[in-house]
Amino acid sequence: MNSTDLMFFAAVAETGGIGRAAARLNTVQSNVTGRIRALEQALRVPLFHRGSRGVTLTRAGERLLPYALQVGHLLAEARHALLAEGEPRGPLRIGAMETTAALRLPGPLADFAARHPDVDIELETGPTERLIARVLDRSLEGAFVAGPVAQADLVGIPVFTEELVLVAHPAVGDLAALLDRLARARDAKVLVFRAGCSYRRRLEDFLARQGLVHVRRMEFGTLDGILGCVAAGLGVTLVPRGVADPAHRAGRVSLHPVPDGDGHAPTLLVHRADVRPSAAFARFAEQVRAAFPDTPSASP
């Protein structure tokens, strides 16, 4: 048994199939099958139940998985320790909210890629809760998430503050008219990203304070889908002003500031507190802060 065997085992356990694990590991299925069989023979226990729909862990496999993941994490940290010195190089896996990736990151990412061609950047988008979980389990080195973040094992670097606006059909004149329309419509809807999105939670909290608890949710996977359906009159959403400005200038939607200070949301670049950032991540963080200079200092 060695670290490569454990890496193959963990990939099969996490993906639930030999083929899916082979795709993740960029190898052939026979190689994965051979590794798993060799590991089972060495340990003298079956690690998976095989079925037509994939594989599931046996009790022995369930006991082994945490150790396999821990070995993988230690190897990743060792790799980070070596990459923390000298010029940035190697992989840089970061996450971002969909709105941040669309609005804020194209320029800094292009600039960073031009300056550091030896860094392989991977960007994953998702809601704040999922991104934080991905940083905590070391799948991502860092992520842009909505603050505040009350997590002792994360360091948060403030990068910018978004002005959030309510986005509605262009025929809606002002905020009072928007709230009245939502109160009167039996089929009133808010168009939101899936659960775990901080902007969705802010919108739901705002509507609840207005007594609009009957409003139904419609979940989307893309920002373009949300804005397109708002323009068509399907419902209302809450996004950063910069994201909705182009549609507003084109006359497709109306924008309405959120009152009482609820319309400002900090965005943080978070990373694990117990892992030294790689040189690539440290340089990227410096570059992002330089691109958005009017931010306070980092906070744990």
Image (cartoon, helix red, strand yellow):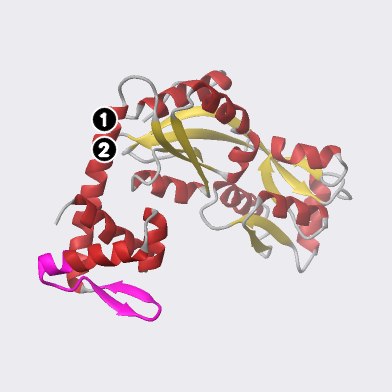
Q: Where is residue 182 in the image (x, y as percent from the top left)?
A: 76, 58
- Name the disc covering residue 173, or none: none
What span is colored magenta in the figure?
Answer: 39-57
Q: Is residue 243 above or below residue 2?
A: above
**Who is closer to the viewer here, 59 or 129?**
59
Residue 282 appears in the picture as rendered = yes
Judging by the rendered image, the residue that carries numbered circle 2 is: 77
Residue 16 appears in the picture as rendered = no
The quarter of the picture where the C terminus appears is top left
Q: Where is residue 173 in the image (x, y as percent from the top left)?
A: 87, 45
State the separation of the CA atoms marked 1 and 2. 6 Å
Q: Where is residue 297 in the image (x, y as percent from the top left)?
A: 44, 21
Instruction: Check if residue 51 falls in the magenta segment.
Output: yes
Residue at 77 percent of width and 69 percent of height: 186
Residue type at the position of mark 1: Ala
**Who is closer to the viewer here, 164 or 32?**
32
Judging by the rendered image, the residue that carries numbered circle 1 is: 81
Crowdedness near tag 1: few (<14), some (14–19) or many (≥20) residues, C-alpha within 10 Å: some
Q: Could you tell me which secondary element the residue under label 1 belongs to?
A: helix
Residue at 85 percent of width and 47 percent of height: 252
**Who is closer to the viewer here, 139 or 159?**
139
- Left or right: 66, with 189 as reference point: left
